Image (spheres, rainbow, N blue to C red):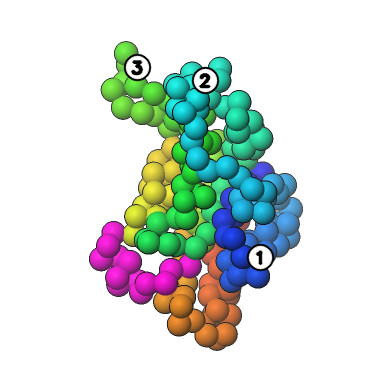
Amino acid sequence: MRALVVYCHPEPGSFNAAICSLVCAKLREAGAELRLRNLYAENFQPVLSQQEWHDYLDPARNTLPVTWDVETLRWCNTLIFVYPTWWYGPPAMLKGWLDRVMVPEVAFLMPDAQSTNIRPGLQHITRLGVFTTCGASFLLTSLVGAPGKRTLLRGVGYLCSPNRRSVFAAHYLMDSSTPKSRAQHLDHVDRKMDRLLAPL
């Protein structure tokens, strides 16, 4: 198993950091090869530049500014996101990672003479995990449409193997969380990771 964990939170002591530590520990216990992309700690530049926009459809050039990320995305067969949900979606830092790394001929294939729609480019990824925290309740997040969850589980998920295993866990009402609720959520994440890492 080759796992890429994309972690996004500006505070090293956050609850998201505890979730990320647990996720990585579970991967190591399972014997996975692990690469961690800590977007804030590594000062990832999330803004798609004008030059990158011009090169976006050129597979000879569109990966050059994000070579490590693209190589790692092609290398992994397990992809996991750990992040806080802000305004019902991923932080701008994580959205920028998607914008800059999930480029044509890497994450997806552009329409051509045979197909009028994009086609998946990450079918080597057979496991997809999404772990987040939400200030809003489950009910309010669902009412709004949970755009962050949909972007990663459905949008990125569509690009992965059609037989992929996906797991999702969110701690809702994070702003009124308690030590008990956070401990219970870590237990929940632990169980979700067991399911994600079980033999396919």
Question: Residue extending furthest top?
Answer: 113
The residue pinned by badge 2 equals 59
Task: Tell me the kind of residue under disc 2.
Answer: Pro
Q: How many tags in the picture?
A: 3
In the rendered image, residue 26, in percent from the top left (x then y), is placed at: 67, 62
Task: Tell me the kind of residue under disc 3.
Answer: Asp
The CA distance from mark 1 to mark 2 is: 35 Å
Identify the magenta region: 132-145
In the rendered image, residue 93, in percent from the top left (x then y), is placed at: 52, 50
In the displayed structure, 168 sits above or below 100; it is below
Label 1: state its secondary structure.
Answer: loop
- Residue pictured at 61% horizontal, 50% vertical: 39
Question: Residue extending furthest front?
Answer: 50
Q: Specify which label sits upstream in the sequence, 1 or 3.
A: 1
Q: Nearer the viewer, residue 68 or 115?
A: 68
The residue pinned by badge 1 equals 12
Q: Is residue 147 visible?
A: yes
Residue 2, numbered label = none
In the rendered image, residue 112, in percent from the top left (x then y), is placed at: 35, 17
Query: Can residue 195 be found in the magenta stretch?
Result: no
- Residue pictured at 57% horizontal, 60% vertical: 9
Q: Specify which label sits upstream in the sequence, 2 or 3.
A: 2
In the displayed structure, 85 sits above or below 113; it is below
The residue pinned by badge 3 equals 112
